[in-house]
Amino acid sequence: MKKYRLTFILFVVIILSTLAACGNEGVGDDRDDGRIVAYTSFYPMYDFTSKIGGDKIKVYNMVPAGIDPHDWEPKASDIVNLEKADIFIYNGAGMEHWVEDILASICNEDLVVVEASKGIDLLDKKDHDHYDGHDHGQYDPHVWLNPQNAKLEMKNIMDALVALDPANKEYYEENFNTYSQELDILHGEFLNTIEPLPNRDIVVSHMAFSYLCHAYGLNQVAIEGLSSHSEPNPGRMAKIIDFIRENDIRVVFFEELSSPKIAEAIAQATGARVDVLHPLEGLRTEEIEKGEDYFSIMRKNLEALKRALE
């Protein structure tokens, strides 16, 4: 169904683009102030790009606040707007299932396209997750949950902005160096906090934490698959309940962009409690209004892990 819907959207986009002669009419409002127009696929890409680009760029995020990017599909208006961009930044690694088809429909030959995860060692989900469901794609795409990978993504974004706007090279490099140091500090906080903790197993609702667990020696047991809206079967539920009881797991993690009902049911059946572990796929509007960002959410994740594992 998604494929047919996307095909229809692309057909509409082609018609609209043809009517506009595949030009950049209407871009003037975005370019009047001289800033680069950047479009990003979903929240981490938006946050990283905003941090590196600062006031030299104008950033638009395609996936709205509070929406799970796994299930989001672009509307015709999203693709038409993308035609106006100077640069488009997406995560890759299979996260954005729609990217290949959308880019093939874009008429803007000058659009710079950045796959932020390029160069990162991807983890095969079968090797790093104890989940026996069937998800599409070989790799876990949630690379940004390891701060060292987040640094590599920021560098890829910086390199692209420097190539596009060499006059502001030092500005982008200075921003990258600032946040690179912050990411090193964050990485150290995770290492120093998690290393002495006695337990290593975490039960999560969404199989999103391979990179975080791999970086800090944790073992992820997922109730559901890579999509936060996949449903575990009764056999999987029974296995999770047995694992929790046998390993004295005290916390079942869920995330804010999906329903906690399954995690709550498992917690109730085992005497565990529930807590939030945030995959940073998207922030709710209220989180954005409070000034939350990658760093603040990751530190909240660290506090939650400490409570669960100590």
Image (cartoon, rainbow, N blue to C red):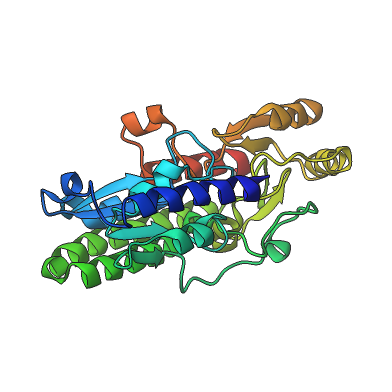
181 and 12: which is toward the camera: 12
Along the horizontal axis of the image, is 28 left or right of 68? left
Can the viewer see residue 100?
yes
148 and 50: which is toward the camera: 50
Q: Position of residue 37 (x, y in %)?
A: 24, 53
Along the horizontal axis of the image, is 63 left or right of 219? left
Residue farthest along the front direction in this orientation:
19
In this picture, is 65 found above or below 299? above
226 and 293: which is toward the camera: 226
In this picture, is 242 found above or below 111? above
**Residue sitting at x 31%, y 51%:** 20
**Residue sitting at x 11%, y 48%:** 32
Total numbered circles? 0
157 and 1: which is toward the camera: 1
Q: Position of residue 49 (x, y in %)?
A: 31, 55
**Residue sitting at x 60%, y 45%:** 5
Which quarter shows the N terminus? top right
Q: Position of residue 95 (x, y in %)?
A: 55, 56
Can the viewer see residue 299?
no
Along the horizontal axis of the image, is 70 left or right of 53? right
